[in-house]
């Protein structure tokens, strides 16, 4: 039944005003449904309990209380989702920071570091340039998400707030976004070449000769990144009952982060060695098109991987 997997010692629950208030918030969220605006449980009377999955994200200290809320919801509301899972996350601590550091303060710190790194890279302060405002926000979000999600959720995370931010650091979200922008620049360069008459339009994929891909780096990208990506996504989260029986669920966000970092490292190494857009000579076009098609696949994987973390791709950085 719905109580399977819960703490067996939860045989009593003191119903308080605070507990009922939190329960009301959960009920309201379930009624709203997905972010696309479609209705939630109310859309299918009688089927809500089967169509909605609730994931409780809690700390180890709050897990028992959240299980009480889970059971109380099921006991008091016939529309309560039968599928409720609990994701337990470890504590987050910041080295050398006051214990009162808030999430907005942490974000503003990383945003300021992103702006400083950009000023050093471009030799001018772009903080007041409206065209860069959204880019800085995305870079700050990427820095934070890779910093926090590269660790298994159940583990303790120690933040180093003094860390500087650079596109050259190969373990950061900034590095991944930098290579995302490099790919965008590559395809923009090809498109400009087409408009200038230097390169022909891209031929049908079925006509490409992939035997012209002879670089080891090309096959590393294909076999280590492009082909394994669907399997990676299926392993990162198991939310349905068949994959994750019992109460708890595991979100392997660290697998996605490490995959995207490794993909960026492999692409960066390849891109630094191989000149993709060669001279506009017909006998070189076959290899150029095969390489561009491979990198289109790399770009698609990178974009979809970032999307799983709630990050949009960047075209410049």
Image (cartoon, helix red, strand yellow):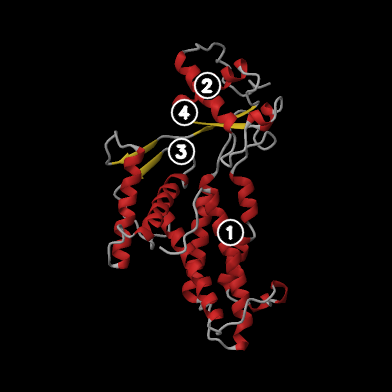
Residue 175 shows up from this direction: yes
How much space separates mark 3 and mark 2, taking CA atoms? 28 Å
Labelled pair 3, 2 in contact (Cβ < 8 Å): no
Q: Residue at x 69, y 72 (%)?
A: 205
Q: Is residue 45 left or right of residue 133?
A: right
Q: Look at discs 3 and 2 and give the one toward the viewer.
A: 2
Residue 281 location, quadrant: bottom right
The numbered disc on residue 60 is: 4
Q: Sequence order check: which comes first, mark 3 or mark 4?
A: 4
Q: Sequence order check: which comes first, mark 1 or mark 3?
A: 3
- Label 3 residue SS: loop
Q: Position of residue 52 (x, y in %)?
A: 64, 32
The numbered disc on residue 301 is: 1
Q: Sequence order check: which comes first, mark 3 or mark 2?
A: 2
Q: Residue at x 55, y 49 (%)?
A: 308
Q: Position of residue 86 (x, y in %)?
A: 55, 30
Bin the neighbour count of mark 4 within 10 Å (Cα to Cα): few under 14, some 14-19, many 20 and up. Answer: some
């Amino acid at each position: 039944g719905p109580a399977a997997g819960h703490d067996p010692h939860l045989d009593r629950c003191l119903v308080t005003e605070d507990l009922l208030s939190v329960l009301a918030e959960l009920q309201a969220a379930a009624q709203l449904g997905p972010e696309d605006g479609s209705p939630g449980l109310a859309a299918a009377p009688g089927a809500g309990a089967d169509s909605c999955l609730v994931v409780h994200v809690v700390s180890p200290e709050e897990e028992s209380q959240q299980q009480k809320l889970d059971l109380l919801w099921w006991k008091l509301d016939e529309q309560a989702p039968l599928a409720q899972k609990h994701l337990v996350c470890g504590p987050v601590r910041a080295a050398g920071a006051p214990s009162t550091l808030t999430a907005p303060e942490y974000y503003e710190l990383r945003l300021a570091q992103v702006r400083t790194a950009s000023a050093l890279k471009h030799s001018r302060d772009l903080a007041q340039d409206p065209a860069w405002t959204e880019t800085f926000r995305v870079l700050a979000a990427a820095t934070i998400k890779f910093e926090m999600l590269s660790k298994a959720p159940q583990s303790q995370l120690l933040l180093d707030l003094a860390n500087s931010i650079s596109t050259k650091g190969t373990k950061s979200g900034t590095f991944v976004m930098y290579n995302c922008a490099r790919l965008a620049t590559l395809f923009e360069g090809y498109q400009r070449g087409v408009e200038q008459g230097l390169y022909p339009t891209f031929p049908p994929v079925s006509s490409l000769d992939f035997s012209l891909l002879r670089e080891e780096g090309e096959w590393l990208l294909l076999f280590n990144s492009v082909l394994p990506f669907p399997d990676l996504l299926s392993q990162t989260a198991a939310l349905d009952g068949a994959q994750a029986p019992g109460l708890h669920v595991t979100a392997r966000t660290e697998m996605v982060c490490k995959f995207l970092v490794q993909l960026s490292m492999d692409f960066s190494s390849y891109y630094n060695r191989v000149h993709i857009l060669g001279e506009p000579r017909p006998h070189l076009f076959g290899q150029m098109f095969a390489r561009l098609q491979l990198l289109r696949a790399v770009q698609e994987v990178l974009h979809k991987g970032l999307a799983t973390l709630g990050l949009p791709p960047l075209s410049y950085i």
